[in-house]
Image (cartoon, rainbow, N blue to C red):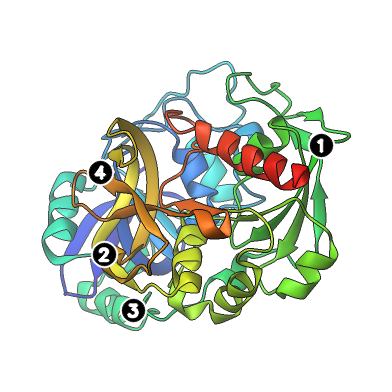
Amino acid sequence: MTQPALLALEDGTTWPGLAFGATGTTTGEIVFNTSLTGYQEILTDPSYHGQIVTMTQPHIGNYGCNPADDESERVWAAGFVVRSLSPVVSNWRASQSLPDYLAERGIVGATEVDTRALVRHIRTYGAMRAALSSEITDAAELTAVARAARDMNGLDLVREVTCAEPYHWTEGADWWQPVAVNGEQSAVSSGQYHVVAYDFGIKRNMLRLLAGKGCRITVVPATTPAADVLALNPDGIFLSNGPGDPAACTYAVTAVRDLLGQKPIFGICLGHQILGLALGANTYKLKFGHRGGNQPVQVVAHGRVQISSHNHGFAVDALTLPDGALNSHINLNDNCCEGIDAPNYRAFSVQYHPESSPGPHDSDELFDKFVDLMREGIGD
């Protein structure tokens, strides 16, 4: 790798490196992730659509990539920045190196970037628009490209990642069971509980865990009206993760508001924010967001702390939650709202990712809570 790469932020700072992956220029919001592993799951998480991801872990790529670890059908991250790309791939599951994986999918990457200084800069000045290029080496020119990129505030990216038509999910595996080398999952032919899952940018492991808990799953587009969901006669409704500004997804907020109290509802990440908006709360943009696999969250009900996986740049303002909706989880780093419990509506949500793959799995119990609510509803 000798081809230069350059990252330019909208504030005029530039960060040189060496290119890997595809040749080209890309733009997006510059963010960082503190996870030690899971770069392939991060790249294929639709919640990263429109973002250039920087990894704080300095050594990236040593275990390669394989089809089974993809969280969706494509890479959604706009670009990828690392400190030191591993020259060696050593893992029995690997079928491809990270550079080849990105090149095949048209994603620009950069290594030999001073990511420690870059992350400190983002923490100080906040996430901002950026441009990453293996073609443009002029700082002023690339900075202009960054400044012309889309701003995440007010941006509806869900319409760009959601499925076009409803479909049935038929694969399942418990999280502790390794996936076959060929990526195949055991088929789920039937399940006791019918779940309609809104696809705001859904991850496959969410669906696998629901299936593993005995759910038959119908995935529907993000713009599906409440009446169409209820016509499917679900036992429960799942609100997935996704990218962009939740306040821009007015169609989803309206649908969830109409669904409140009709069926048990479980939301994750963007689904949590949309539930909060549907209940009447407000959302706001965090300075640099939470992204990583080591975030401490306290469960208010019993006070215990869970280590959790995060990927969000917006949050629910807990002070605006209405009566009857509780701030059920608190982030111990900045005290932001990490969960909502609205028992009168049989609805709850978490801002973080209990389905995280790879781990941690401290919050796997939340899927059991959803199943319990559906079981109680069937018994009514």
Kindly identify the residue that appears in the image at 26 percent across and 47 percent down.
331
Q: Are marks 4 and 1 in contact (CB under 8 Å)?
A: no
Q: Are marks 2 and 3 in contact (CB under 8 Å)?
A: no
- Marks 2 and 3: which is nearer the front? 2
- Horizontal arrangement in the rendering, residue 304 relative to residue 104 (left or right): left
Residue 30 at x, y = what percent? 31, 62
Question: Along the polypeptide, which appears first: circle 2 or circle 3?
Answer: 3
Q: Are marks 4 and 2 in contact (CB under 8 Å)?
A: no
**What is the distance, in whole Å, between disc 2 and disc 3 at their CAs?**
24 Å
Count of numbered badges drawn on the protein:
4
As helix, strand or loop, the secondary structure at mark 2 comes to strand
Q: Are marks 3 and 4 in contact (CB under 8 Å)?
A: no
Residue annotated with mark 3: 145
Residue annotated with mark 2: 286
**What is the distance, in whole Å, between disc 3 and disc 1 at their CAs?**
52 Å
Q: Residues within 10 Å of mark 3 (few under 14, many from 20)?
A: many
Residue type, numbered disc 2:
Leu
Q: Nearer the viewer, residue 322 or 329?
A: 322
As helix, strand or loop, the secondary structure at mark 4 comes to loop
Residue type, numbered disc 4:
Glu
**What is the distance, in whole Å, between disc 1 and disc 2 at their CAs?**
39 Å
Kindly identify the residue that appears in the image at 48 percent across and 18 percent down.
90
Is there any visible trace of residue 217 in the rendered image? yes
Could you say which quadrant of the image residue 177 lies in?
top right
Residue 199 at x, y = what percent? 65, 60
Residue annotated with mark 1: 192
- Kindly identify which numbered label has been placed on residue 112: 4
Kindly identify the residue that appears in the image at 17 percent across and 74 percent down.
11
Which residue sits furthest right? Answer: 189
Residue 88 at x, y = what percent? 42, 24
Question: Along the polypeptide, which appears first: circle 4 or circle 1?
Answer: 4
